[in-house]
Amino acid sequence: MQAIIDFFTQKYAFLLFMALEILCINLIVQNNSYQRASALNSTNAISGNLLEKTNGVKHYFHLKETNDSLVQENARLMAQLAMVHNQLFGLEEPDFCEDSELALKKTVLLDTLFSRRQQKPMYYFIGAQVINKSTLKLNNTITINKGIKDGVHPEMGVISKQGVVGVVKDVSENFSLIIPIIHKSLRVGTKLQSNGLIGSLRWDLKNPAYAVVDDIPKHEHISVGDTVLTSGYSSFFPPNVMIGVVEGWVLAEGSNFYQIKIKLATDFSRLDYVYVIDDKRRPEQKVLEYKAKNE
């Protein structure tokens, strides 16, 4: 207590001066409209800056929740887009189709698309965050933070917002291990967008940014810049998912097939979020094919 009394005794003149200064400033502001407006504007600017900084800090600490929410929303929209794409696929008719027949089909299809009936998409997408990955090994893997409890199972295809990522290999309750297309043993069915030629994708084992498409016959025409998509013949991926772009090709001596070098669309070095594809028809397809194989 004595220390407090000594402080005020020693600083009495300074404290009195500050109190009088504050009183004078208050009287000037209260009794002059111009000074009052200026003070109000300054106060608002200072408080606005403080609020902006505070909100920025709060936003930073909520980035994870925001990203997770956006990933789930993207997954929902991707499912709807896949459903609409499959329904619109029927609009592509051969040239010999009569105009009236095509018009009728379009009318029926559009009526179905915009009807109020609930339609279930064939593909669902489970958004997940990448929590571990390797890109410089022969047997690269990716770990995500979704597992059995989230509906993830082995042999599900995985894509990113850029393109194909890989296939789920193993799952636990909360995590999944993905074999990416930059793995020495993974093969993916492909097609060229320009002419629909079917091929098979494999990693070149050298650079995580490039891969090779095989099985395109040498008499076919290949163009640099052509887009490489999923063929749809694999049970892992829907058709027409982006894989990469043709950068060149070689024809080995004595071979009848090109080796096409492609630049992969997915940047694995910056891969943060992915979408696991849940094809609701896949179990039925597997049962049917297994039955045919063992007859």
Image: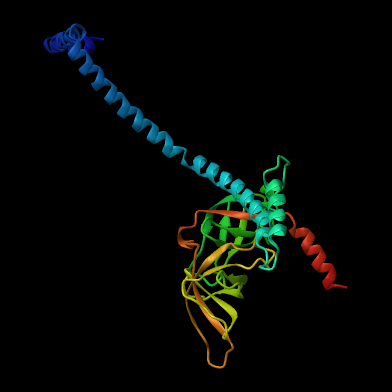
Task: List x then y, in percent, for residue 185.
Answer: 61, 73
Left or right: 265 with respect to 50?
A: right
Could you tell me which quadrant the C terminus lies in? bottom right
Task: List x then y, in percent, for residue 129.
Answer: 54, 51
**Which is more toward the observer, 184 or 217?**
217
Could you tell me which quadrant the N terminus lies in? top left
**Is residue 45 something that shows in the picture?**
yes
**Is residue 6 something that shows in the picture?**
no
Task: List x then y, in percent, for residue 242.
Answer: 55, 63
The residue depicted at 26 percent of the width and 20 percent of the height is 43
The residue depicted at 25 percent of the width and 20 percent of the height is 41
Left or right: 4 with respect to 138?
A: left
The residue depicted at 66 percent of the width and 65 percent of the height is 232
Task: List x then y, in percent, for residue 153.
Answer: 69, 56
Which of the 4 image quadrants contains residue 159? bottom right
Question: How is the model colour-coded?
Answer: rainbow
**Which is more toward the observer, 124 or 57?**
124
